[in-house]
C-alpha cells in the first residue's frame, strides 16, 4: 500500500447550522479540501 497525502484546506460556512449533520459538514469540508488540493483523480 502506498502513502497518500491530501494537501489542501476546506472550510464550511461559519455560523449556526442546526439543520446540517456533522457528517454533511465533514463531507462539505473534505470535498472543498480535495478541490483546493487540485484533485485530478487519475489512474496509476
Image (spheres, rainbow, N blue to C red):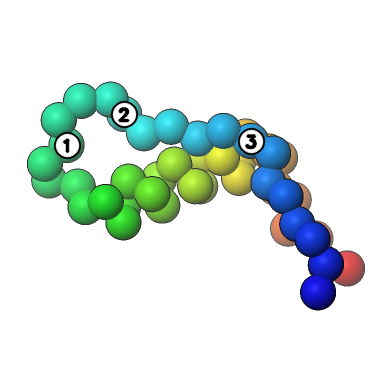
Q: Is residue 4 above or below residue 31?
A: below
Which labelled disc corresponds to residue 8?
3
Q: Is residue 8 above or below residue 14?
A: below
Disc 2: which residue? 13
Which labelled disc corresponds to residue 31?
none
Q: Position of residue 38 (x, y in %)?
A: 71, 40
Q: Position of residue 11 (x, y in %)?
A: 43, 32
Q: Are marks 2 and 3 in contact (CB under 8 Å)?
A: no
The residue drawn where x is 64% and y is 35% is 8
Tell me the crowding category of disc 2: few under 14, some 14 to 19, or many 20 or more residues within 10 angstroms, Cα based: few
Residue 10 as seen in the image, left or right of residue 15: right
Which quarter of the figure is the N terminus placed in?
bottom right
Disc 1: which residue? 17
Q: Position of residue 23 (x, y in %)?
A: 31, 56
Q: Residue furthest top?
A: 14
The residue drawn where x is 44% and y is 42% is 29
- Mark 1 → mark 2, Cα distance in angstroms: 8 Å
Q: Is residue 2 above or below residue 32?
A: below
Where disc 3 sits, the SS reads loop
Amino acid at each position: 500500500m502506498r502513502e497518500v497525502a491530501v494537501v489542501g484546506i476546506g472550510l464550511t460556512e461559519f455560523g449556526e447550522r442546526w439543520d446540517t449533520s456533522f457528517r454533511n459538514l465533514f463531507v462539505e469540508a473534505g470535498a472543498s479540501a480535495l478541490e483546493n488540493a487540485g484533485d485530478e483523480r487519475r489512474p496509476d
